[in-house]
Image: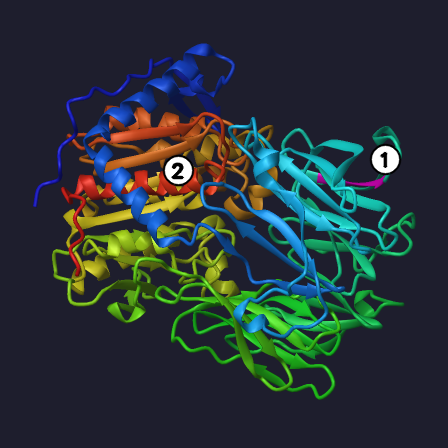
Amino acid sequence: MERVKVTPARPPVAAERPHVLEAHGDRRVDPYYWLRDKQNPEVIAYLEAENAYAEAVMAGGAELEEKLYREIIGRVQETDTSAPTLFKGWWSYTRTVEGLDYEIYCRRRGESDAGHAQGALPDTPEEVLLDANELAKGHPYFELGYVERSPDENLIAYASDVDGSELHELRFRDLARAADLDDVVGGVYYGAAWSADSKTFFYVKPDKAMRPFQVWRHTLGAPTEEDVLVFQEDDERFEVSIELSKSERYIFISTASQVTSEYHYLRSDEPEAEPAIIEPRRTDIEYSVDHQDDRFLILTNDGATNFRLMAAPTASPGRESWTDVVPERAGVRLNFTDVHKGHVVLGQRSDGLERLEVLNCTTGDLHIVAQPDAAYTAFPGSSPNYDSSVMRFFYTSLTAPWAAVDYEMETRDRTIVKEQPVRGGYNRDDYLTERLWAVAPDGVRVPISIVYRKHVRTKASPLLLYGYGAYEHSNDPMFDPARLSLLDRGFAFAIAHVRGGGEMGREWYENGKLLRKRNTFDDFIACALQLVADGYTIPERLAIRGRSAGGLLIGAVLNERPDLFGCAVAQVPFVDALTTMLDDKLPLTVNEYDEWGNPAQPEYYSYIKSYSPYDNVRPASYPALLVTGGLNDPRVSYWEPAKWVARLRTANRSDCAIVMKTQMGAGHMGPSGRYESWREEAFVMAFVLSRFGIDGQRRAG
């Protein structure tokens, strides 16, 4: 089957203005370097011209896009309420309203948990704590960075971002008066903690490179100019965060690079105390800390590649006092802890699955939380009650809608509090999910998760393959109601669990980073070849998709095997990797050295150059490609996708469409608001479907 040809619309042509970049005796010429100047009106005009071209290319699919958008909305319970949680005499929850973009934060008085299995709420008056729809008025973009309730439940602190830059404005709301206090702090990042007195608040600020590096203390009612700097991290490789322990007795300040971490702490009832250190940093040693009664629980790779759980007295938390609680076990990667008074929930990964394991701190017994599916995703959720033996977790799979589950850790009873409703008559028995394996060139077996509708698959079926493969982030199988629009048109959807992610333990990650990064791309290509060999699709009907670091993956494999794919989507893609990593003035560059390498060193320079998508564009017949960017993106600058698209067009020997859409008022996370997010997803799906010549009709009954 031939690829569908580009529409007659003509793409904009970026002017070539050669800029020479030299390092280690190597000379590169970048014709589109000028696109980095955001203040240049010509740059903005070019991005707007690209958006107009994208609209023209998609004009023929506008009806399909609208149909997909309506299908997505038709599967979502637009007016809905989250699974409520009971804490300190309040049932807290969020709700959404049809036609409104954002969540409304609410609570009701109530002490009993009767009826909570159905998500029922007590028949008491509702209090609206925060209506994000009201806060968003007048802003084309809006996102809440966090909403933190004070320990006395009388106040909330909330941080809002109105342009996608991830710089937030911090405000405080008096819940009794339903009104904001006069206190306002600008330029705030993620990470926050209340002190026990509910009058002192700790927040994080970033430096000019958007690296969170300071913790500040604010006293309610005091001028913000009097806020106190509590902690500062001067090493540019490290990022700072802060949080309150579930016990609410300690505040933890973490500072971490990609491979090294360090924790400081102070009692929450002594907010003006000097933070004390748990254990000084040591290169390549990571640890995280939580509190349980008279001890700190420490998850660390110190002496354990796949991490172990240790404990230390709160009176002497240094390494010399650490003792084993759960030792390292072969094939089991410990990822996180959720600490209760009598139990510890361990997030562990084994056999390629994220599992929940419960430690009974009285008996020392460990047990895995049994789950109904062979492949799934499960992780702890909103369980604020430290004293409770009930742990809440969220559960999903490629065919199982999201569910909030309460698990009694003593009796092992599970109660589904709420399951995500899927409108339109969804029946999970109509879909089949499998776990497949590909073999990489070096002989390593790579897992693939796949889902498709029964009875519609053929050897020429279209298939969308997704990948990421960085930062030890695991692409676990999760349900997405929007995906049904593809599955019901005969598509299969697959995830390539490539190295660089965390699916198969710490070594899986380490073998897909730095000077082993090419394994990520080899794994993805191996997965694509396996899906073709097993008769799930053919190259002309194989679409691929990735986001951010996953966009780098898409760019790299397109350069390697443009013939293997019929269509590609790269969202906010990190494709100008070498130039970005050479510029230590850009946001987040320095603390990325541990992930990608520092190209100031010749070995890393040569290696990154060997795969950087922008530097390796070559004359070839590239498949149809959709690229997205965000003008205010602090993580992947808008010019990376813009430069890449311009260079691809000069090298492309096919007549397939290469289009780019830039969100002119948003950042890395894409458009804000659920309706605009759904519309973007419909746009992406319409691009893929139209490139394969698939119309709006569903293929399955």
Q: Is residue 466 visible?
A: no
Q: For the point 15% across and 30% down, which residue is it?
A: 655
Foreground residue among 104 and 399: 104
Q: Which residue is mark 1?
A: 227
Q: Residue 52 location, x and y as percent?
A: 31, 21
Q: Residue 343 location, x and y as percent?
A: 69, 77
Q: Which residue is mark 2?
A: 612
Q: Main secondary structure of the magenta part?
A: strand
- What residue occupies the far top of the structure in this picture? 41
24, above or below 496, in the image: above
Residue 215 magenta-highlighted = yes
Quarter of the image where one finds residue 519: bottom left
Q: Residue 517 location, x and y as percent?
A: 43, 50
Q: Earlier in the sequence, mark 1 or mark 2?
A: 1
Q: For the point 19% across and 39% down, which residue is it?
A: 690
Quarter of the image where one finds residue 282: bottom right
At label 1, which amino acid type do we have?
A: Asp
Foreground residue among 565 and 280: 565
Question: Is residue 109 left or right of 588 when viewed as pictured?
Answer: right
Helix, strand or loop status at disc 1: loop
Residue 147 magenta-highlighted = no
314, above or below 276, in the image: below
Quarter of the figure that contains the C terminus: bottom left
Q: Nearer the viewer, mark 1 or mark 2?
A: 1
Helix, strand or loop status at disc 2: loop
Question: Is residue 65 left or right of 103 when viewed as pictured?
Answer: left
Q: Residues within 10 Å of mark 2 (few under 14, many from 20)?
A: many
Distance from the alpha carbon under mark 1 to that under mark 2: 43 Å
Question: Is residue 48 left or right of 238 when viewed as pictured?
Answer: left
At label 2, which amino acid type do we have?
A: Ser
In magenta, the rendered stretch is 213-219
